[in-house]
């Protein structure tokens, strides 16, 4: 009788549908944040996540419908909700280890598209099962809510509406509320807890399965205690800051001479501050050639715009070496700007606008002597900031003798690589393009202008530099700089496959790095690999 009583309350069944839909979307968004530090948050990874989840939901719909027809026992549905809840609660605790374990195994088994295969298999292992279980909710609830064929359309429509509304809320709440406020791990636990409560309410009302309910609560509490405090970079210690924003996973760490920002665990340094204000040894230093090319030291009220401000590494350097220069930046992630002020001594004179770089250029009329393009989304430039249309917009915001400088962070030898696409696209817009490879790095810095003899003028200006450290570096840049001859590769707003091109380079870099260990594994097995570390 207890079961019949709670099932007669259609509002409870509608709430089950509502929170199931909400949890599916919350888990999907949580999945993107869980995977981002290891595989990026590119369109490719999003495609894998969405495709995997749709597979799980479709299979759940099919199996749930057959199960409801064969054995319409609501105990089974609500126990599936509890199992899904416990599984989702375990994701913050075990997910990162599963991701790294799968990646480590695939390193020795896959020769191409490693990141794609690793992301796909990680999604399959971590997310398919709980979302398959959630996929059984709708067909099961239809069985309990449809009283007769006369109102079946209305009832099924109402269930669908509750599921859709829940999905909408489950899309916005994690992105704008829970992930920025309490992080991905707690977000998983919040929605896991909601599903667990739904199941417990049912079984408490029917006075059934008390042992299983008690075990599920115990496991949830265990996952909450050990999973809520987990870190993405669990091998790191002594971080100044670790947290999440709407856009990024963020960590700030410090060593004897530097403070460093990383926006993804496995993809290096995004911003750096040298404590003694010296040069960084990175591409920022090479990019200082742009103000010299543009004649900034000789100009009255020169201006520099940085698209992809980060914590202000380039802005600080420009202010240090070029007296009187005005520097402003555009950074899409307000949290990064907050960290810049707290940990990286961002100068108060540097104005930072929280906006997308291209949208910002669309909104302003100012012209600049130098525009630095350093806007990266994980491992690739956002497609809208890699196209011919975008670089035309940049050119139109430069003074007549202005310079655009672009950081290209992935060096590759393969014909048709991402750097060739970017360089050819830029060369189709600007009259003079030259590049220089950054020593001991995979970065390449590109300079573009409308001044044909820019390299000759640059050499003459280098010889006038009084600051010895900067002069020495600029002499190195001058000696390594090469004019770029335009090819036929082109990126446009309509077609800019930068993420696929970026994945190819990352895959190539990974294969180069693990080649030695593959050979050791082939000759000596896993013991040889472990002993080689």
Image: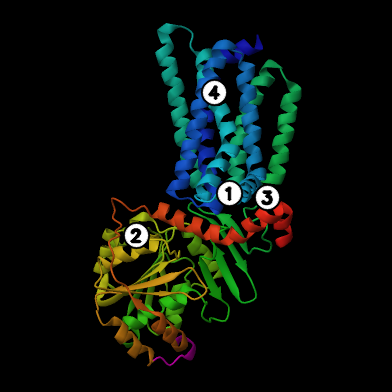
Closer to the observer: label 3 or label 2? Answer: 2
Provide the residue span drawn in magenta.
465-470
Mark 4 or 1 closer to N-term? 4
- Mark positioned earlier in the residue sequence (3 or 2): 3
Would you call the spot at circle 3 few (<14 residues within 10 Å), some (14-19), or many (20 or more)?
few
Residue 229's tag is 3
Mark 3 and mark 2: Cα distance apart in space: 38 Å
Q: Looking at the image, is mark 2 or mark 1 nearer the viewer?
A: 2
Do callouts 3 and 2 mark residues in contact (Cβ within 8 Å)? no
> Do the residues bearing badges 4 and 2 touch, measured as CB atoms within 8 Å?
no
CB contact under 8 Å: marks 2 and 1: no
Q: In the rendering, at what x and y percent does residue 70 appear?
A: 57, 11
Mark pair 4, 3: CA separation: 32 Å
Residue 383, image quadrant: bottom left
The residue under label 4 is 136
Which residue does the image show at 54% across and 13% down from the upper left?
144
Q: Is residue 213 left or right of residue 438?
A: right
User: Quick check: 213 above or below 267?
Assistant: above
Which residue is found at the position 54% from the left and 57% from the top?
A: 511
Q: Does the magenta stretch include residue 469?
A: yes
Q: Mark 1 points at which residue?
A: 183
Answer with mark 1 or mark 3, whichever residue precedes in sequence: 1
Disc 2: which residue? 386
């Amino acid at each position: 009788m207890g079961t019949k009583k709670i099932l007669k309350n259609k509002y409870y069944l509608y709430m089950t549908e509502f929170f199931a839909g909400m949890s599916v979307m919350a888990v999907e968004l949580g999945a993107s944040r869980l995977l981002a530090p290891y595989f990026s948050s590119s369109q490719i990874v999003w495609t894998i996540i969405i495709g995997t989840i749709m597979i799980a939901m479709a299979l759940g719909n099919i199996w749930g419908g057959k199960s409801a027809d064969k054995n319409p026992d609501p105990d089974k549905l609500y126990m599936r909700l509890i199992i899904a809840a416990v599984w989702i609660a375990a994701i913050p605790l075990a997910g990162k280890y599963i991701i790294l374990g799968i990646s480590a195994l695939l390193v020795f088994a896959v020769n191409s598209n490693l990141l794609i295969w690793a992301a796909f298999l990680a999604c399959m292992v971590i997310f398919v099962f709980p979302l398959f279980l959630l996929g059984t909710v709708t067909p099961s609830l239809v069985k309990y809510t449809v009283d007769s064929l006369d109102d079946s359309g209305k009832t099924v429509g109402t269930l669908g509406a509750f599921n859709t509304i829940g999905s909408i809320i489950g899309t916005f709440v994690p992105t704008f509320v829970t992930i920025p406020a309490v992080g991905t791990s707690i977000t998983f636990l919040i929605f896991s807890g909601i599903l667990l409560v739904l199941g417990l309410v049912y079984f408490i009302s029917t006075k059934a399965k008390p042992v299983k309910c008690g075990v599920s609560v115990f496991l949830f509490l265990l996952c909450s205690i050990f999973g809520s405090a987990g870190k993405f970079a669990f091998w790191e210690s002594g971080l100044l800051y670790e947290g999440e924003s709407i856009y990024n996973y963020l960590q700030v760490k410090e060593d004897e001479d530097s403070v460093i920002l990383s926006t993804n665990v496995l993809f290096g340094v995004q911003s750096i501050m040298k404590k003694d204000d010296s040069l960084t040894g990175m591409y920022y230093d090479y990019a200082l050639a742009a103000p010299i090319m543009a004649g900034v030291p000789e100009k009255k009220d020169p201006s520099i715009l940085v698209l992809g401000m980060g914590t202000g590494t380039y802005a600080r350097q420009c202010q240090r070496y070029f007296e009187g220069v005005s520097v402003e930046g555009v950074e899409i992630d307000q949290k990064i700007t907050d960290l810049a002020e707290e940990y990286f001594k961002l100068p108060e004179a540097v104005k930072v606008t929280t906006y997308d770089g291209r949208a910002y250029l669309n909104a302003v009329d100012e012209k600049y002597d130098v525009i630095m393009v350093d806007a990266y989304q994980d491992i690739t430039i956002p497609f809208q900031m890699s196209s011919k249309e975008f670089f035309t917009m940049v050119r139109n915001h430069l003074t007549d003798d202005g310079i655009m400088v672009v950081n290209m962070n992935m060096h590759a030898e393969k014909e048709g690589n991402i750097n060739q696409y970017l360089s050819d696209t830029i060369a189709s817009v600007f009259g003079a393009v030259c590049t220089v490879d950054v020593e001991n790095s995979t970065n390449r810095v590109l300079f573009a202008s409308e001044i044909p003899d820019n390299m000759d003028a640059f050499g003459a200006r280098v010889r006038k530099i009084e600051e010895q450290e900067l002069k020495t570096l600029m002499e190195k840049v001058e000696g390594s700089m090469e004019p770029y001859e335009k090819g036929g590769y082109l990126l446009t707003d309509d077609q800019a496959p930068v993420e696929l091109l970026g994945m190819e380079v990352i895959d190539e870099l990974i294969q180069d790095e693990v080649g030695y260990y593959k050979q050791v594994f082939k000759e000596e097995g896993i013991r040889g690999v472990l002993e080689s570390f």
